[in-house]
Each structure stands twice: as C-alpha cells, then as structure tokens.
Image (spheres, rainbow, N blue to C red):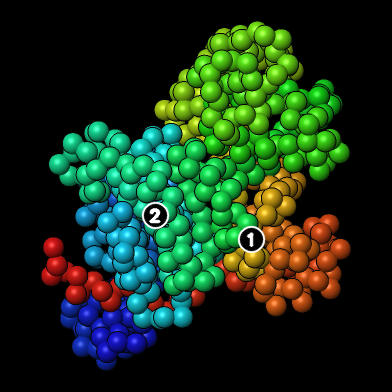
Amino acid sequence: MPDECVNGRPKNVPRTATPLSTRNALHLTGILPPAVENLNQQKKRALAQLRAKSSSLEKYMFLAWLRNTNVRLFYRLVIDEFEELAPIIYTPTVGNACLEYSHIYPFLVPSGVPDGLYLSIDDLPNLTQIIKNYRPNPFSESLTPQIAVITDGSRILGLGDLGVNGMAIPIGKLHLYVAGAGIDPRRTLPIIIDLGTDNEKNLNDEFYLGIRKKRVSDDEFYPFIDAVLKALTSVYPDLLIQFEDFSSKHAFDLLTKYRDNLFCFNDDIQGTGAVILSGFINAVRLVEKDVHPTKHRILFFGAGSASVGVAKQLLEFFKIEHGMSEEEAKKLVWLVDTKGLVTCDRGDELASHKVYFARSDNEGHQYKSLMDVIEYIKPTVLIGLSSAGGAFDKTVLKRMTELNKNPIIFPLSDPEVDAECTFEDAIRNTNNRVIFASGTGFPPLVDQATGKILYPGQGNNMYIYPGLGLGAILAHPDKITERQIYASASALAESLTKEEFDQNFLYPAIQRIRRVSAEIAAAVIVTSVDEGLARNPEINSMVKKDLQELLSRSGEKWQALVKYVEERMWDPNNEEAFPTESLIEKSKFLN
Ligand SMILES: O=C([O-])CC(=O)C(=O)O
Ligand SMILES: [Mg+2]
C-alpha cells in the first residue's frame, strides 16, 4: 500500500464520511464541514441531485462523475434504485452517451482515473505492455480482472459504427455486472478496440477521440483481434471475455473461431438469444391452451447476427423440451431481411449466417414486404431485430390480432427510436391481447377499461449476462457451452415469483436482478459441473455430491447453492474504502 494511503483511503482526499478520529489523526480537521455522514445519507443527497437534472444525458454524466470519484456511493445508488437508474447507465441512455462520447469524455472521468482500456491498431507491437498499463486497482495486485467486455464499436446497439465512441457500451455492461451480479468493480475490464471507423460524422468531428482512419480490412482485423486475445490471456489467464457489439459477420466469425478454445461468449448472439428464449418459454406457456408449443410459426423481422442467434436458441427449446429434431424445429422459423423473405432461390448471394434458415419451400414465390410475408406465413410469433423503428405498424399489429387470440410480439431493436413498435402501439392495436417484450425499456401503461397497470416485458440481455458471467467466473469451466447458455435461459424463465407468474409477466421484476442473477449463476455452475468442465475444486466437490437434486433446480440443496452464490457478491457497504480515489490528488494537476 503506498504511503499516501491509510486503509486504502488516501490521506489527502477527505470525504464527509471520514470519522472525526481519522480527521484528527490525519490533520484533516478544518478542511471539511463538521458533519460526519454515512453512506445512506450520502446516497439520499446524490439521488436528490440526480433527480433534479432534466435530461437523461445530464443524469448519465452526473452518474459517471460519481462513479469516477466515489465508487461505493455510485454502486449503492445503482443497486438500490436499479429500476430507475439502469435505463440511464445502460440502455437506452447509454446509446446517447455513445453518440456524444467524444464531446463529453473529459467530464466522465473527472478524477483522471481511467474508465477502461483503449487498444488501437497502432498498438499492435506493444499490446501486452499496454494491457498492463490499465490497472483498475493499483493497490492490490491480487485483484486482477475477472471479466472483460470487449467491442470494436462497429455495431453499437442499433446505432451502427460509432468507432471509439462505443466505449460507453463495455463500461455500461460492466456497471451492470457489478450492480446486477455482484462482481467486484475492481475486477472488471472494459475494452474498446479502435480499428478506425467508417462513420463520416465522427471522422469529420473536430472532437472525435478515436483514430481518424477508415476501418481496417479483414486481413488486418482478424490477426489484430487474435493478438489482443493472446495478450489478454497471457496477462490474465483466467479472464472471461464477453464479445459485444461487433458487426454481424465478425460477431459470428469470432464466436465460431474462439468458442471452443477461449473462455468467452458473445452477448449479442448468445446473451440476447438466451433472454428471448426465456421470454419465449414463458410466452408459449401463456398461450399453450390455444396454440400447441410445436405448432408455433415464428417470423423474424431482421436477419442480422442477433436474429439468427435468437432463432438458434429457440430451436434448443423445441429440441430439449419437445423432442423435435433440428430439421423439424428449423421449419418453425422464417427470416425477413431488407429484401423480403430469406429463401434459397431469391437470386442474391445470402450472407453466410442467413443460409441456415433460408427457406426452400416457397415454391418459387418471393415475398417482399412484411405484410406479404405475414399473409403467407400467418405467424403466431413476430420478433423484430431490424433496427427499423415503427416497422410493426397498425396494419401489422391488427393483422396479427386477427390471426391470433394472443399474438406474441417482441420488438427487440433498441434504442427506442429503432424499436419496431412501442408498448402503447402494441396494446392499442391488439386490444390488449398482445404478449409483449421489447429490447428497450418502455414505461408501464394504465388499462383504461380496468384501471390495472400493464407492465411491458423487457427482453434485454441484461437479465442474462451478469448471472451467466458470475456462474462462469465461480465454476470456471474450460469453455462456455450451449448447454450452459440454455440453462441460464431456463433458470431465468423459472425465476418468476408467484405474483409475477400470476400477473403473466414474461420476465421477473428488474429490481430483483441480484437474486435472479444468483439463480442463473447457480444453474450455470450445476451445468458446467455436470458437463465435467468446471475447474474450481470447491465448486466441484460441493455440487457433485448432490448433482441430481441440483439439476432439478428445486429443494434445499438448490437454495443453499443460490445462497452460496449470493454470499460471494460484492457489496459496497462491506468495502472499507476504494483505492482508486487516491489518484485524485495527483490527477488534478494533469490536463
Ligand atoms: O445493450 C443492450 O441494450 C442490448 C445489446 O446488447 C445490444 O443491443 O447490442
Ligand atoms: Mg450488445
């Protein structure tokens, strides 16, 4: 511990929580107002300041300032007020923060303590050293990063290529790892890889903070990613790597290349897939008396990485729960892209990831518009991952309601402007018969007829990845498998409380995220032990002896495992001090 620190707290950075005895001992008396506060009082004040801000971006900036100067207070606030603050530090406001990132960056890191690691194409020769430069916790070498979220900024949410401005995404994702699954914030590593950008607006913006070059070609892209992953795992051999917001083709290629030989997963393909699968499992259950589960007709509007990832996850449900073969299950799925229904005989060269679901039973007909496709397929389920805001218009919604007693409609694109329809549109145009989940968060509505409050489901991968990551970190399997992903989805579906179940919720209340993450983590742990992949000896011996009971996810042993996971979550109140604070004094003199 460096000299300027006492109990991890810097001598020179007085806080209103510093006890009088410490103030006396450290000669701080007189340079602070007399009151001594606790974390709860500080939280109350911060919340009042936050709520007084009028725009969500101002709130984002205030929270970034708080995190950068007082980490414990920031997380106390986010954990306690998760429902209110997740939409600010994460989707949808984080999308605005990305658009503005280069304009607001200096105000997000007032202490000068970095918020993440920037690796650019020019760093290739020195990657290992540069990775070592980023030390989220300079005072304890043993607290090495456990989880990295890594993006190249090429497909940020539905906003496209934002270059280095995409950094707000790994940062936001990792905030949710801490708040939602209790990962120690000092053990998180947000990474942006800057390989240039094709975004002209950024390239012409005088404040843009990334390298001003067009994106590199695939000949440079793949070797660079390989070098980064090699360097990262040489510095941190146990690191879990979450790929995030890579452009579609790269996302699939990287997952295919690394899923069997690296401790990693892709949040947009596997995380989104699992969260939608989970909502789908509960939606199928809700309409079961009218539609037999194996008789669903599922139409995906949008055929990018997320759509194909989600569609493949849904197949697992039909295979595992309903004994269908892959070929049979695949026939329940249709994809629509900008050119219409994806078929084998459309006459264009299909991107490789679309080929798997391309239909060959269209008898030579091509269906161009969404309505044409709806008339042809008569879907029971309509899933949007198109970034085409408003595409599920009145005509589409009304037709889905004519075709189904309870149409299952999931407009999953985010941010909000990209959502295929709003919750209000869906309720209004289906006479409140819709089974709904969106990617972005919509506010609840009041049912005019009954006065009841209607809550939209939010099928965002934030329900899955924190718990999946926590389970993987604890059990440390050699790799993340499809079975573990499926287990996380089905544990999420089962995590509803009786009240949530009775209210036809598709997802649990988000305020319960820590409990939900613990259940997902436990399911991942049990699966990885069952697969023989878990490396953590303590977990292996604990789980193996009760494996059969634990696989059923009920009973005392299961509850005990969930509790074991919960007890390993980081809590801001248990932490004496947060060492990054000590850099504040030094950094005040830098520009
Ligand atoms: O971040 C989110 O809200 C969901 C997500 O991964 C994406 O849209 O890429
Ligand atoms: Mg994403």
Choose the circle earlier in sequence order: 1 or 2.
2
In this figure, which residue is indicated by the disc labeled 2? 224
Q: Quadrant of the C terminus?
A: bottom left
Residue 76 visible to an observer of this rendering? no
Using the image, determine if residue 68 lies above or below residue 323. Answer: below
**Residue 1, image quadrant:** bottom left
Q: Nearer the viewer, mark 1 or mark 2?
A: 2
Task: Determine the residue positioned at 59% across, 15% down.
Answer: 346
Mark 2 Cα within 10 Å, few/some/many (few <14, many 20+)? many
> Residue 493 or 161: which is nearer the viewer?
161
In this figure, which residue is indicated by the disc labeled 1? 479
Q: What element carries label 2?
A: helix
Q: Where is residue 297 in the image (x, y as percent from the top left)?
A: 73, 22
> Residue 242 or 499: which is nearer the viewer?
242
Q: Which amino acid does label 1 sit on?
A: Lys
Query: In screen coordinates, is 45 left or right of 500?
Result: left
Quick check: marks 1 and 2 in contact, CB under 8 Å?
A: no
Query: In screen coordinates, is 300 left or right of 27?
Result: right
